[in-house]
Image (cartoon, coloured by chain):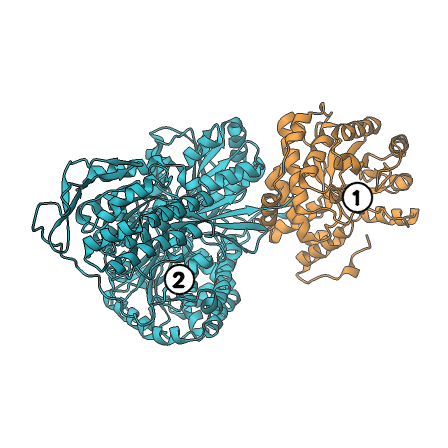
Amino acid sequence: MSIVRNPGIPLDMKYVGGLQINRSALERRASTLGTRRSVKKDNQTAWLLKAITFIDLTTLAGDDTDGRVRRLCTKARHPVRADVLKMLGAEGLDIKPGAVCVYNNFVKTAVQALEGTGIPVAAVSTGFPAGHTPLGTRLSEIRASVKAGAKEIDIVIERHMALNEDWRALYNMVKRCREVCGDAHIKVILATGELGTLTNVAKASMVSMMAGADFIKTSTGKESVNATLPVSLVMVRMIREYLEMTGYKIGYKPAGGISDAKTALVYMSMMKEELGGEWLTPELFRFGASSLLGDIERQLEHRATGRYAAAHHQSLV
Amino acid sequence: MSVKEIFETMEYGSAPESDAEAKAWLASHKKQFELFIGGKWVKASGKSFAANSPSSGAKLAMISQATKADIAKAVKAADTAGASWRALSGHARAKYLYALARLVQKHARVLAVLESMDNGKPIRETRDIDIPLVARHFYHHAGWASLRDSELSGYEPLGVVGQIIPWNFPLLMMAWKIAPALAAGNTVVMKPAEQTSLTALYFAELCMKAGLPDGVVNIVTGDGETGQAIVAHKGISKIAFTGSTEVGKFIRKATAGSGKDITLELGGKSPFIVFSDADLDSAVEGVVNAIWFNQGEVCCAGSRLLVSEAIADKFYKKLKRRMDKLRVGDPLDKTIDMGSLVDKTQLTRIQNMVEAGLKEGGEIYQANIPMPNKGCFMRPTLITGVDTACTLVREEIFGPVMVAMTFRTPDEAIQLANNTRYGLAASVWSENINTALDMAARIKAGVIWVNSTNQLDAAVGFGGMRESGYGREGGREGMLAYLKPKAKSGNSDAQPIAVIKPTALKSNAPVDGIDKTAKNYVGGKQARPDGSSVMPVVSPEGGLLGEVGRGNRKDIRNAVEAATKSAKWPSSTAHLRAQIIYYIGENLDARKDEFAQRIKSMTGCTLSAAKKEVALSVERLFFYAGFADKFDGAVHAPPVRDIAIAMNEPIGIVGIVAPQTAPLLGFISTLAPVIATGNRAVIIPSDIHPLAATDFYQILETSDVPAGVVNIITGEHDVLTPTLAEHDEVNALWYFGKAGGVAGVEAASIGNLKQVWSHKEQQIDWATSYGRRFMEKASQVKNVWVPYGA
């Protein structure tokens, strides 16, 4: 499947200004997303395998080293034990994570480690996680990451622009980054935990898409509150609005806080319910997570053997 | 499908909840149930009938049909249990209710499954909504049992209460009925709907496990005939009914004059109003929860969609897309949104209704989704392009069918919302708090949900206006529906009301020589009676004190018309109403001697007694003037982030038939609370001593009472009352008139189900009858749920 890239549209301030989210009503819907659907047995197996393909295996820590990044890439090559896949009757399936996500400095390492796998490298390249470095510096960082082989760039927005409702500035900033990304896809991190209101989340989502985002993403993982279902619901609804307005499909990436298989399935069901089954593809949906993979592996092993699995039987993420 | 195939299709598959435990329970009863009377299973004298699963058609069990004799047994058991149950301390009763709450929680899963099997509703709803609310209801009312004596002092239980509930929320409706009744100290005879008896029978076992004293709860299964036997039984003090408006009217008529209290929670056609500034995606989810919750088999379902014309197309598009995501299927499957209708009868009725309705116009859209190929399932349905003249807009469908119309302005939204015989609930969607609260205040409904829908909680009263019934369930107002004021000390046995024989006229010459003929008082003016006929007012000695108009049907019509036109009074400030009523009191006081003389001449009482009656009348006016701005509502505390406001609202136009005796005090005691709460009154004064009321015209004229707020028609109670009791614009009737009139008034009230409050043919001492109860009877509680969250 090939998704037509969103070229962006002119900023429609009238539209953005009119966006309103009713928090209580939205939370009520979010609270039943996990109770209205359930995936069991073989369906659960298939869904969990699919979930792996959505994961952006990520390491974004101060103590990252080449060695750490290489280990992550090795895990990306072998996300699930072959014996487990075989027992599940899934051995022919192309199960690999959506991407490996690292700081700009480790793009090169990751690209080399993943050579031949088709797994793209994503880079966080704009003064991650605060976004407070000068724009020029950030743009150079993007250029450097792209040059080093990153196929996806995760940028962070400057929160003050959203908090002060300076949507024009946000639009221009994202648009500049998008231009510099070239063919690399751009994911715009809204840092929703720091935007104060769901209405701000909606507006920041919409402005980012108008500016040309390929994906909108909740969080850096460094805020005190990361991906939540209510925030996700707001963002996917905005994606649906944008689709209706323009015909372009924008991807969604919740990041941080999704660490178990069960939660991942709820998010996937949300995508299917709110946007449709066609969003259940790595081109349009990612999890920003790494420990999630370990839990999925254990659930898969349980599905395969009928025994609850041990964490130390799975290779490290 | 193989894992690899599912990996491509990403289907949910099915996730059935196990029915093993529920089936084991049915088997433990050999799929054969008796009646629960006096704490034991008792063989019914009637036949058995089958309980079927509407989704699969399978027979689940055989249920007993309770006959008149069985009901007699049950009432006797409840009556016997009543004395000691009533005598228990509040804490002791609380412990039983608490135990029931805990037991419901401990048996939550099997109850949820059983309910789903029996009714066809999705397991998600029984598991996450019905059963938790049942437990919550018992917890909440365990508290009321503890608090009754301190928080509701001055009240006592009614006795044996007959309770009849519908099939749409079987166990939840049972909890709504049983919990407050028991907390208040009543004992109950409960009849579940014949389609859904199983969870009630399971609950009977929980009562045994809780050690509930024998006979406090009796569960009698059966159909409408069993219900009729309950309604007719003389040993029952109150009937609490939830169900159709049709049956509600039957019950009102059947109990007319019996002295039974009744509360009715009936049908609805509740508006769901979406303004252009609403969070539309959330409003779409609201529609899902309004009309496709419980297959639309919900009395308070938002079933009339009113959308701002500016966004209607956009909203319909969103809604249709959402409909195509709904999943309909096996109620026990955890992946479905909507289960089966309760039985074939309902399915056929709804399908026929929709088919016939569409002939009047409208476009139908039905969810484009896979459907089960057997069972009583129906597609989620939206009908647009209909109008208020269409049957589908006017009549309750009670199924998964939404009808939609558009409006242009808030005023038009209100007009459409209130253009219905019902008044149960409403849902208002706008991000503008001014718009939302304005709607909430102006919609005629007992429950208003701002930016939400179908929110229910034990702490918040639930119940309707108009033909959606009367009485509230939940909250303090719900407790009051199971209590009555304690009999006054020293007067525990109320006396039957005296039949008064009018004195025969002995002389046609006016007592004081000048002809005085009072007219009616309508729309702020004195109006000649339509029939130009008069009747004499006779002194105790047989002298002619004067003449008053002999009112007829048309005078009542004109008076109600005038009251209808006085539309500003209900929304006038309480302070203004207080000022006017104080002023009436002031002006009456200025003419107290004249009124005392009048009372003395009509009744033959002593001058000092007459003076006392006038003084008390002035006192009453001051009392209700003082109360007008202190009859506060409440803010309830449901377990969600909501401000739930209980507002006391006027009922509308209240007809009053004033007492024959106490010609001024009885007149004022009934009139003052009615207008203090913002109602408009059409009052028929004493028909044997009417001159105090006709003298009162001048007081009203000098007291700035707006035209039409008080309308007075003189004439015989027997003649005027039926017209007033039948009038469809009259929303409540207070009957304190001539002996023997209550039965007729109650029976006549069914046309529009007006609330009737009466002396129940008992003597009332007007010198001591006043207070909060009068304000409560003159008003109805509207609960407004206002969620918040920045």
Q: Are marks 1 and 2 on the same chain?
A: no
Q: Amino acid at mark 2?
A: Leu
Q: Is residue B266 visible?
A: no
Q: Secondary structure at mark 1?
A: loop
Residue B642 placement (x, y as % from top left): 57, 50
Disc 1 packing (10 Å; few <14; some 14–19; many ≥20): many
Disc 2 packing (10 Å; few <14; some 14–19; many ≥20): many
Query: Which numbered tag is attached to residue A220?
Result: 1
Q: Is residue B426 visible?
A: yes
Q: Secondary structure at mark 2?
A: helix
Chain that is coloured orange in the picture: A
Q: In whole angstroms, how far apart are the C-alphas of marks 1 and 2?
A: 53 Å
- Taking the spot 28% from the left edge, 45% from the top edge, the residue there is B696
Left or right of B225 in this view: A312: right
Q: Quadrant of the C terminus of chain B?
A: top right
Residue identified by numbered label 2 = B198
The disc numbered 1 marks a residue on which chain? A
Q: Amino acid at mark 1?
A: Thr
Viewer-proximal residue, B76 or A55? B76
Residue B667 placement (x, y as % from top left): 29, 51
Above or below, A166 against B303 in this view is above
Left or right of B737 in this view: A120: right
Q: Which shade of the palette goes to chain B?
A: cyan
Residue A32 placement (x, y as % from top left): 58, 49
- Taking the spot 28% from the left edge, 50% from the top edge, the residue there is B249
Left or right of A41 in this view: A316: right
